[in-house]
Image: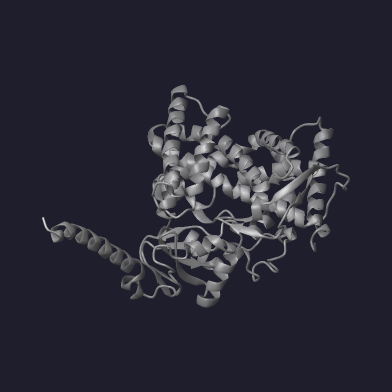
Amino acid sequence: MDQYSILFPVFTAAAAVAISVVVFLWRQWGEPWRRRRVPPGSMGWPYIGETLKLYSEDPNRFFSIRRKRYGNIFKSHILGCPCVMISSPEAAKIVLANKAHLFKPTYPPSKERMIGPEALFFHQGNYHSLLKKTVVASFSPSAIRGSVAALQNIALRLLSKWERINTVCTFQEMKKYAFEVAMISAFGDEEEPETRQGIRCLYENLEKGYNSMPLNIPGTPFHRAIKARKALNCRLKKIIEKRRSACRGGGLLGNLLNLQNQLTDSQIADNVIGVIFAAHDTTATVLTWLLKYLHDNPSVLQAVAGEQEGIRRKLQVEGNRGLTWDDTRDMLLTTRVIQETLRSASILSFTFREAVEDVEFQGYVIPKGWKVLPLFRTIHHSSDLFPQPHIFDPSRFEVPPRPNTFMPFGNGVHSCPGSDLAKLEMLVLLHHLTTTYRWRVVGEEDTIQYGPFPVPKGGLPIQVTPWKNTLPVVASDHQYQNS
C-alpha cells in the first residue's frame, strides 16, 4: 500500500471537518440572515462570539457601548447562540408579556443541559401550566408563611459562627444560607444532613461548569459539571423512590409527587434542580450586595436597624417569641432597601427568550431560533426611569415604579414564582444581622468581579463584631434619603 492510499482517508476526513466548520460559520455569520434586516451589531469571534467580553467586564459598560453604537436593539453572539438584545421597557413588555407566544423561554443548550430539559423555565403550553400552578402553590405567601421559624433557625446558625471567624467571605456565607433555604423549599425538612451534604457537593461541581464554555472534554469545568449532573439525577431519583414508597414528603418535591402519574421521575428531578438553581446564587448575590450597600450608607443602616430594633422589642414584650410572617410585613423600610438593592445591583442583567418564528420587531427581523435578551440592568439603570440611578436611594420606592421598569424577578407568565420566598429570607437574615452585629469591609471596597453575576471583589470580605443597639426605635425615611 503506497503513501497516497494511506493518507487519502486522512485528507478526506480533514476536508470533511473543514467543510463542516465553513458551513457552520456560514450559517451563523453568513448570508441567510444578512439578506434580511436584522438589528445592527457585532457577532464577535466565531463560536466564542462576545461571551468572554460579557462575562468578564462591567455589564453596564458592555451594554452602554453597544447601545450608543447601535441603538436600543442590537445583535450579538453569546454562549454559542446568535441573539438580539433589547433595552427599553416597551420592548421588554412585548417580548415577556404582550407577545410572549412568539418568544419561548429558553437558555443556551449548555445551560438547559445543566438544569435539565424538563424544567419549568424551558416550556410553554399545558406542561408549563401544570408545573407553574404547582410551583406557585409551593411558594405562595400562604405556603411559605409557616416557614419563617425554619429560616430564622438557619440564619441564627449561620450568624453565630461569624463571631469565631477572623474574616468572613460574605458571598460564600450567603451561598450557604441560600442553599439551606433552597433545600428546605425543595425537600421540606425531612432529608438527613448526609443527604443534604451529598447533594450540595454535586451541586457545587455542577455550578462551576454552568457558565463555562460548553467544551465537553475531560478536565474542563463543563465536563466535570456534566458528570455531576448525572450523579445528581441518580441521587434525586433514589429520594423520589423513597418518598413515593413512604407516601409522604414536604416541600416542592412533595407537591410534585402529589400530581400522581402526570410527571415522570426525570421531570420531577429536573424541576427540583431548577428550583435550587433559581434560589441559590441569585439570592446569595443580592444578600452580599445588601451588606455592601448598608456598610457604605451608614444612615441607611441606622434606619434599618431602628426599624428592626422596634420589631425585636415587640417580640420581647410578647413573651420573647420568634419572628412570624406578620412581623415581616411590618418591615416596610427594610423592604424598600431590598428593592433598591435589586435595582442597583441588577444581578440578573437579562433573561433568555427564543423567537419561535421570524418576528417583525420594531423595524427589524428577528430570525427564528435566535435568542432575545431583555436587558433588565439597562432598564433599571436608566436615568429617565430612575433619576440619579448611580445613587443608592431606597426612598425612590415609596412610590411604586412605572409598570415594566422594575423587573428583578422577570415579567409575564414566566416571572420567578419564588420571589416572595427570596424576599422573606432576606428580611429574616437582615432582622438578626442588623440588631446583633456590625461589620467592616476588608480590602478593596469598590472593586467588582464578574463571573457571571457582579459581586464585590473577593466576595466582600468582612470582619464582624457584636453590637449593642442604642438607636431610636422609630426611623424615618429622611434619615437616609441624601446619604
Indicate the position of residue 381 as horizontal and vertical percent values.
63, 66
Where residue 108 sits, quadrant-wise, is bottom left
Answer above or below: position of 17 versus 193. Answer: below
Where residue 454 sits, quadrant-wise, is bottom right
Q: Residue at x 83, y 34 (%)?
A: 316
Residue 276 left/right relative to 345: left
As rendered, which of 427 and 413 lies closer to the eye? 427
Residue 128 visible in image: no
Quarter in which the C terminus is drawn: bottom right
Answer above or below: position of 96 versus 155. Answer: below
As rendered, which of 87 and 415 lies closer to the eye? 87
As rendered, which of 457 and 40 lies closer to the eye? 457
Residue situated furthest left in the rendering: 1
Quarter in which the N terminus is drawn: bottom left
Q: Residue at x 83, y 38 (%)?
A: 313
Q: How is the image coloured?
A: one colour
Total labels: the figure holds 0
Q: Residue at x 84, y 34 (%)?
A: 317
Residue 404 left/right relative to 209: right
Indicate the position of residue 311 as horizontal and vertical percent values.
79, 41
Indicate the position of residue 304 as horizontal and vertical percent values.
78, 50
Residue situated furthest front in the rendering: 2
Residue 479 visible in image: yes
Residue situated furthest top in the rendering: 246
Q: Residue at x 59, y 66 (%)?
A: 60
Indicate the position of residue 472 as horizontal and vertical percent values.
88, 48
Answer above or below: position of 240 versus 93. Answer: above
